[in-house]
Image: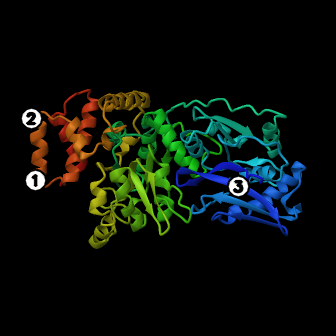
Amino acid sequence: MTTVPKLFTAELDGIEASEIEVEADLNVGLHAFTIVGLADKAVAESKERVNSALKHLGVRQPTRENRRITVNLAPADIKKAGSHYDLAIALAYLLASEQIKPFDPARKLFVGELSLDGTLRSVAGILNIALFARERGFTEIFVPSENASEAAVVPEISAFPVSTLRDLVMHLDGTRTLTPQPRATLAPQFRAGSVAFVDIRGHDAAKRALLVAAAGGHNVLLSGPPGTGKTMLAEAFAGILPPPQEEEILHVTRIWSAAGLTMKEPLVNARPFRAPHHSASAVAILGGGANPKPGEVSLAHRGVLFLDEFPEFHRDVLEGLRQPLESGEILVARAKKTLVFPARFTLIAAMNPCPCGYFEDPAHECRCSAAEVFRYQRKISGPLLDRIDIQLEIPRIPTEELHATRDHTRGNDEKIRARVLYAREFQKERFKKHERVLFSNSEMSSREAEQFITLDTEADALLKRALDRSLLSPRGYYRTLKVARTIADLDRSPQVRAPHIAEALQYRVKQE
């Protein structure tokens, strides 16, 4: 009795991979080539790609077999989507038809899309699959050449770049040996911003607040008339964030790989900066779809999500931001499955104070009625606003300040980066023995805030007074506490003092 060859590949479900067994069987009967195992249209079309690739390999093709060919993708209850099954299906057929020398597939994993001439095309999610392969004890993974450097990031597993089906067959036959891709190294780096703080005139208070936000990973809302520099401040903010840690690079790259965004650059070595348009749908921003993919909130993981014209975003998008702003992840629930995507980002939101943009602007007359202003500002709900740590009004810059000689010594980005980096190192040292991995002050829960933040007597009295006067909600209390801890980190103070609390309250409590 002949054995049915069994090879291994993987299915990507969100950003997590799962093992898929590929079996091929040739049986007596009229010609038929069938793929079973809950395969979608892209997998079903694999028959045509595999057939053409095998023709160019010079072997007997499935269409020339006067037998029933059955390819099974197991387990059968997992939906299979995508074209990356081609390589494993072609090899399973070659083994079943005895057109390739038998080999031990036990610790090998095959991923790749075949073109009609037998070359391999790049596919999405290679890093996710390589990480999964290492966890499951695979020692070799065969991937398209364009994906090899991404797979080579994962230690303890050999990533073989495959250019054509012929090259892989000759490697498995022992005719020609493929060389594993050299191990890729992670290179954390600052994001090269298009705008520097030194290029922005005035706004010293806003720059200070953004320094605090960068040091602690806090969310920011910028409100002001059109043309006052809100977008420039957001773009400059991305340039002062510290380089990601190696663990953060892997987290971010996994998400980008699952979304198919690592084809040109296999690693995301700098913090992401995502700026979707306000007309984007909820699926585009929050994630989802028929085969759920990460949205903009996940692509901004460990980086910046910049939402310009904040009130103009769809209501379901704005309210959908509540969960990731609170927990650092987004739950995408659909009828057939529920997935959780990481979404720990720093939100920078910008908005005008009214539809025309000139409410309370001394230089321009506002043409909006009181009802229009109220309705416009009500688009940002109280619960959403309560999750934004720092809320700033960006005024118009005086003409004399705009035309002043640029001072390159103030707000120098290198100095600002150094201060941010020091504050982050201060936090890293504080959290290093904690059971949960924390990268910044903003990630602390209320219990952790109580554990790690100590106040002097004056600071404690000031914060309690603000709470007693109903200036803060309970959530706002802890968020103010975490912002104050970041300000103390910038001052290199082990204890939070009254001036730190006062500055944190200034960013949150609107002055009448």
Numbered circle sitting on residue 23: 3
Judged by depth in the image, the label closer to the viewer, 1 or 2, is 2
SS at badge 3? strand
- Amino acid bearing label 3: Glu
- Image quadrant holding the C terminus, namely bottom left
Gap between marks 2 and 3, in whole Å?
70 Å
Q: CA distance from mark 1 to mark 2?
A: 18 Å
Residue contact at pointers 1 and 2, CB within 8 angstroms: no
Is disc 3 surrounded by few (<14), some (14 to 19) or many (20+) residues within 10 Å? many
Kindly identify which residue carries mark 1: 469
- On screen, residue 10 versus residue 3, left or right, reads left
Q: Is residue 436 visible?
A: yes
* Residue at 41 percent of width and 44 percent of height: 233
Specify the amino acid type for callout 1: Arg
Indicate the secondary structure of the residue bearing disc 2: helix
Q: Within the image, what quadrant is residue 52 found in?
A: bottom right
